[in-house]
Image (tube, helix red, strand yellow):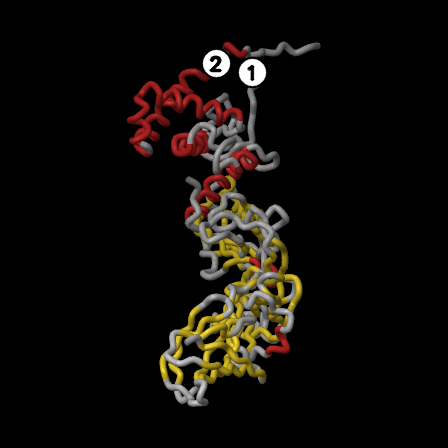
Amino acid sequence: MTKPTLTIRAVQMEALNGPRLQAVEDRLFQRVTTKFPATAGALGDAQTRQLIRRGMGKARRLRLGLEPHVAALVDLVFEFGLDFDTTGPLSWAHAILTERGLDAGARIGLVIARLEAFEAAGMRPA
Amino acid sequence: MATATTTTQSGSGQEVHEPVHSCAKTKGSAMCEVLTARDGSDKTTAVADVKVELSNGPTSSPAKTTTGQGRAEFTALDAGQYTVTIKVEGPIAKFYDLDPAPAPQTRAVTTGPTAYSFLLKSVWIGAAVTYENGAPAPGVPWILRVKKRTGDRLAAKWSTHKEDTSTKEDYVEDYVSKGRYQLAAKVVTAPAWSETDLVVGTAVTLTAKCAWAEDETSGKFELFDVLDPATALHTLTAKAAAGKLEASWTPATDQLGSLKSGLLVFKASVGDVAAFSPVAKIGVKEKVELVDAAGTKLTKRVVLRLSNGQDVEANVNNGEVQITLPWGHAVARVSPTSVSGRVKVEANGGTRSVMVPA
């Protein structure tokens, strides 16, 4: 006898996630306006939220799921730009962020730790 | 029951993007990486074989060594502050700038991985041969020497690390051993005479710089008529000392037999690199006797007209004066004078007479 299954369709998933994603976005908005007031001020609220959402999308593509990891990635987006890991002096980060076999915390943690190591050595990328 | 993606993500947070059944981890880990980069470069390379120690935390773990990816991981750690220290020892140590030694890093390990990253500055060499204006000077042979460092001591002697020829690009060599390096273009420069008015029988010093040449390296000075810089009139040998080639030369007429122009250059060479000197004039000292028709030795100021048309003023004293004649020329006339007669010119063992007009 086949057990009945309940399938959640994408549209339903979106409905389930919507309010929670909005709450995350709100918290990230608070975070970036505090940590990067100059950037957020220059962008204005609407564009700041848009960049946060694009950062969250990038986090999703990079399989960064937990809010602290998403927040860390959004920090990098606000500090170095949305494409920081594909163009410019931080492009080495892409290989780490997409490395199979490392979990999300290790990947984002290594990127941040490496940036700190560069800074400690007086070699922070521009 | 609805199915939803279950991840193995740890930590107190929920998955941002999708509903999740948290699968909490109770242990943490320390993910350590050791990288190296040139100072000022963002290109990193993993460093293997570095000893990594974990300390000061609630869980102890034996030291590990970085893999080919430059990583070492300590797992199953209870939450707490952990200090990671790296020790770059053994044969690999010579490739990195370890002064000061890499500082230990202390981080809070909770659940999940905590990353520690160490960046070592590599020892590397960059070199370029340029003109004075900074433009690249391709095609110049150069030599890179090293006094290797063993512990705190430098080798006493230079040894050749590499020789090559410059290109338009800078020469860069990564991961060289620590030590003192000396780059020198293999060129001979600043060839110079101590005097540019040479006289047969009077010593002159020939010098040239060859900063790259070790002491006792053989070199030579070849002397040429400026009109024929292919046929050496005479050759002097010399040994490099303190980056300089030097020889003393006393010109002799028999060494300059085929000199036509009276103008000399020398070519200073060390090995297959050489440089030509500026031009120097050479002359011959001659004694001129001035005696009037009655045989009286004159004492007076005269002008000697030379065969090249040049006039030389001379004070004749008791019938004699010494002058330096340009190579290949002679006194043609003496003027003005209140006497007439013959003037006897002695030079190089010969005697000639010239007319003193009335």
Local SS, label 1: loop
Vertical order, B217 against B76 (above or below): below
Q: Chain of mark 1?
A: B
Amino acid at the residue labelled 2: Glu
Q: Position of residue B115 (x, y in %)?
A: 50, 44
Q: Nearer the viewer, mark 1 or mark 2?
A: 2
- In this rendering, the count of numbered labels is 2
Q: Residue at x 54, y 50 (%)?
A: B137
* Residue A55 figure quarter: top left
Task: Assess whether mark 2 and mark 1 are in contact (beta carbons under 8 angstroms).
Answer: no
> What x and y, as percent, mark residue B163?
63, 59
Check if mark 1 and mark 2 are on a common chain: no
Identify the residue shown where x is 57% and y is 15%.
B1
The answer to whether any part of residue B94 appears in the image is: no
Chain at numbered mark 2 = A
Q: CA distance from mark 1 to mark 2?
A: 15 Å
Q: Is disc 2 placed on a helix, strand or loop? A: helix
Q: B50 or B138: which is nearer to us? A: B138
Q: Give how far across and how far down residue B184 sits, in percent.
A: 55, 61
Q: Disc 1 marks which amino acid?
A: Ala
Does residue B241 appear anywhere in the picture? yes
| Residue sitting at the far right | A1
Q: Is residue B281 left or right of residue A22?
A: right
| Quarter location, residue A24 | top left
Circle 1 sits on which residue? Answer: B2
User: In the drawing, does residue A28 fall left or right of residue B326?
Assistant: left
Question: Which mark identifies residue A66?
Answer: none
Judged left or right of residue B120, residue B236 is: right
**Residue B101 location, x and y as percent?**
47, 60
Residue receiving disc 2: A14
